[in-house]
Amino acid sequence: MSRNALYYARSLRQIEARHADENLMQRAGQAAAAWAAELAGQRNLPVLVLAGPGNNGGDAFVAARLLRQRFFEVSVVFVGEAKNLPADARNAWQDFVSEGGACLSSIPEDSAWSLIIDGLFGIGLGRAPEGQYAEWIATANRLAQRDRCPLLALDCPSGLNADTGQILGAVIRATHTLSFISAKPGLLTGDGPEYCGRLRIANLELDPANELPPDGRLLELADFAAHLQPRHLNSHKGSNGSAGILGGAHSMVGAAFLAGRAALKLGAGRVYVGLLDPQPPSFDPEQPELMLRRPQSLLQGELDVLACGPGLGNSLEASELLERAIAFDQPLVLDADALNLVASEGNLQVALASRSMPAILTPHPAEAARLLECETADVQADRLAAAREIAERYRCHVALKGCGTVIATVDARCWINSTGNPGMATAGMGDVLTGLITALLAQGWPAEQALLAGVHLHGAAADRLVAAGIGPIGLTAGEVIDAARALFNQWIAQRTAG
C-alpha cells in the first residue's frame, strides 16, 4: 500500500464512485470514532459533533452513533432537513436517531467538552463558509481553546481548501485531522499544516494507487534512499566532485560562504567560491577549506556542478555572469538573485529553457511570482500549480520553498516535503539549501534525487536542532549545516547496517 500518495478532491471522488457499494461511510465513521475515543480519553465530559449538510456530515453521524455505543455522552449539532442529505448520509442520520440519538440546532456554550468533532464540510466545500456554519466554526475554535480539548476534523478542516491549502474564510483550527483514503495536498502545504494539526490517514481498506496515478506524493526518505551509499575506501577528493558557488556581491559575501560551507560539509570534494565583491576576502576564516576565486576564473575552471545566486546582486556584471553560468554544460542550481534576473530578462529565460543539462530552481514565493509574472498571493493560492508551471515554463526541476515545500520535476511529477519548522524563516536558509543540493550533484547524484534529498535533509536537520532545544526562535542557517552533515551520515550508516 502506498502511504505517501496524495490526491486532489476530484480524484478521490472518482475512487469513491468506484466503491459506492462498499459503505465507505461506515468505515470512515468507525475510524473517526476509534480516534475520537482515544482523544477524548478519560476526561468524562461530553463530545460535541458538528454535522454538515453533505457526506462529511454522514461520517460525523456514524462516528457519533459509534461513540454513543462506547458510552460517550454525545451532542450532535445539525440544521436542515435530513431528507435533503445525500442517500448515504441520510441513512447514517437515520441509524443515529434510531438508536436514540438527537440533534441540536445550536451549540450549547454552557457545556465543557472533552472533544469537538468537525464533520461540517471536509473536502466538499470550494468557497468560504457562510452564515450559521461560519458562526459554528468560530465557536468551535473558541470552545476548543477554552476547554483545552482536541478538535478533530474529519477528512479536512472545514474552510480549508483540501487541494491547495488555502484558507477559504472561516476555518476550523484542528488539533487533529483524520484524512480518508489518502492525504490531500492542501493538508501539507500553505496554511494546511497550521490548521490540520496532527494528521492521520484512514485508508478505508482501499489502495488508491492501484486505481489512479497519484496527483502528488509526500516526500519520504525512501524516495532517494537508493543513493545513500558509503564512500569507497579508495576514494579521494577528486572522487567526490568539484562544486562552484557564484555570488557574494558587496555586503553579501556571507550568502556565498553559507552555500559553500554547506556544499563542503555535505561532501563535495572541492568547493570553489567565485565572489563578485570588488574587494573580496582572501579566505573564509570560518571555513578555510573553501577556495576563493574571481568569478571569471571560477567559470573557466573544471567544475562538476555550478550554483549561482547566493548574494549575486542585480548588477550588469551579475547578469552577464549568469548568462555564462546558464551556458555552463554541467548541472546548474539557481537561487535568489539569479532567479530575479531570469525573471526580468527574456534572453536568460530562453537560454535556461534551452539547456540540455539539468537545472534546479529554488524560489521562495515572491521569486516564484516574478518567474510567473503574477502576484505572490497567486502563487500561495495554489502552490502545486505554481511549481508545476515554473517547471514547465523553464524546463527545470523546481523547489517552491515555504511551509510544505513543493517539488515539481520537468515531467510534471510533484512532491510535498513535510520536514522543517518555523525556525527556518530566517536569512541564509535558502543559501544553505543551495549548498546541500550542489554537494549532492557534485557527488554524482541525479538532479531529481539531489533535489528531493536536499530539501528533505534541510528540513530534517532543522527539526533535529529544535528537538535538541536549539530554536525554533533564534535558529540560524549556519547551525543547520553541521546538523545536516550529522544526519546525512546517520542515514547512510543506517542504510548500510540495514
Image: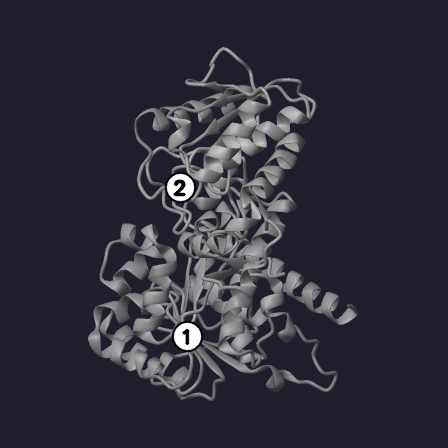
Q: Residue at x 34, y 54 (%)?
A: 382
Look at label 2 and name its amino acid.
Leu
> For residue 330, what is the image quadrant?
bottom left
Disc 2 secondary structure class: loop
Location of the N terminus (image quadrant): bottom right
Q: Which mark is residue 453?
A: none
Residue name at image x 62 percent, y 58 percent: 483
210 or 172, nearer to the observer? 210
Answer with the quarter of the image where residue 114 lies.
top right
Q: Position of residue 381 (x, y in %)?
A: 32, 50
Residue 244 visible in this rendered orientation of the protein: yes
Image-based side of 490 in relation to 15, left or right = right
Kindly identify which residue carries mark 2: 160
Residue 286 appears in view: no
Which of the pair 73/465 is nearer the observer? 73
Farthest residue toward the top? 110
Tell me: 52 left or right of 374. Answer: right
Q: Quadrant of the C terminus?
A: bottom right
Amino acid identity at mark 1: Asp
Q: Is residue 404 or residue 300 the one in the foreground?
A: 404
Q: CA distance from mark 1 to mark 2?
A: 28 Å
Residues packed near mark 1 inside 10 Å, few (<14), some (14 to 19) or many (20 plus) = few
Measured as percent of width and height from the top left, residue 315 is found at: 24, 70
**Identity of the residue drawn at 36% across and 70% down:** 391
Q: Residues within 10 Å of mark 2 (few under 14, many from 20)?
A: many
Which residue position is annotated with label 1?
411
